[in-house]
Image (tube, rainbow, N blue to C red):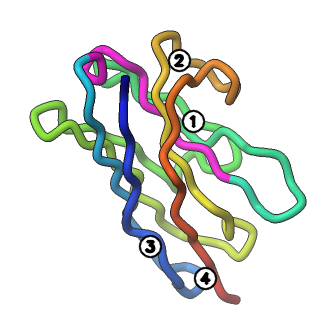
Amino acid sequence: QVQLVESGGGLVQAGGSLRLSCAASGRTVSSATLGWFRQAPGKEREFIGAITWSSNTYYADSVKGRFTTSRDNAENTVYLQMNSLRPEDTAVYYCAASSVGGKRWYTYEYWGQGTQVTVSS
């Protein structure tokens, strides 16, 4: 079993930055791929980025060059640094853990509760 708790969301102006954290617990988390997704009202859950157990990363084209994910295995924490934020980045952001990784939400077995990010214009 894996438990995930996100933090760091909030309100920011367009062009600003936020860093989200996801504290993970569970005996398998160190070997899991940890991903970030977001969901805006009325829209489908969208893949943002992910980091493998060996710290390889991959991102959606919509955030590439603006968002960066990293992990601290000693602290069992994964981070999402978000720069140059836009109003269209407004959503609830989730971290998730998967034994197989990928960009599809249904390959992730464990989910956090989500944290709201609002970007004002």
Give the residue type at disc 3.
Answer: Ser
Which of the marked residues, 2 or 1, is nearer the chain's N terminus?
1
Q: Is residue 6 above or below residue 49?
A: below
Tell me the amino acid under the disc marked 1: Tyr
Q: Mark 4: which amino acid?
A: Ala
Distance in Å between CA atoms under marks 2 and 1: 12 Å
Labelled disc at residue 101: 2
Q: Which residues are magenta?
A: 28-38
Which residue appears farthest toward the right when viewing the image?
42
Secondary element at image label 2: loop
Amino acid of disc 2: Gly
CA separation in Å, label 1 and label 3: 18 Å
> Badge 3, how many Cα within 10 Å: few under 14, some, many 20+?
some
Disc 3: which residue: 17
User: Which of the 4 image quarters holds residue 116?
Assistant: bottom right
Instruction: State the residue at coordinates (54%, 70%).
Output: 84
Tag 2 and tag 1, C-beta contact below 8 Å: no
Residue named by callout 1: 59
**Is the C-beta separation of discs 4 and 2 under 8 Å?**
no
Image quarter for residue 72? top left
Query: Earlier along the polypeptide chain: callout 2 or callout 3?
Result: 3
State the CA–CA distance, disc 2 to disc 3.
26 Å
In whole angstroms, how far apart are the C-alphas of marks 4 and 1? Answer: 21 Å
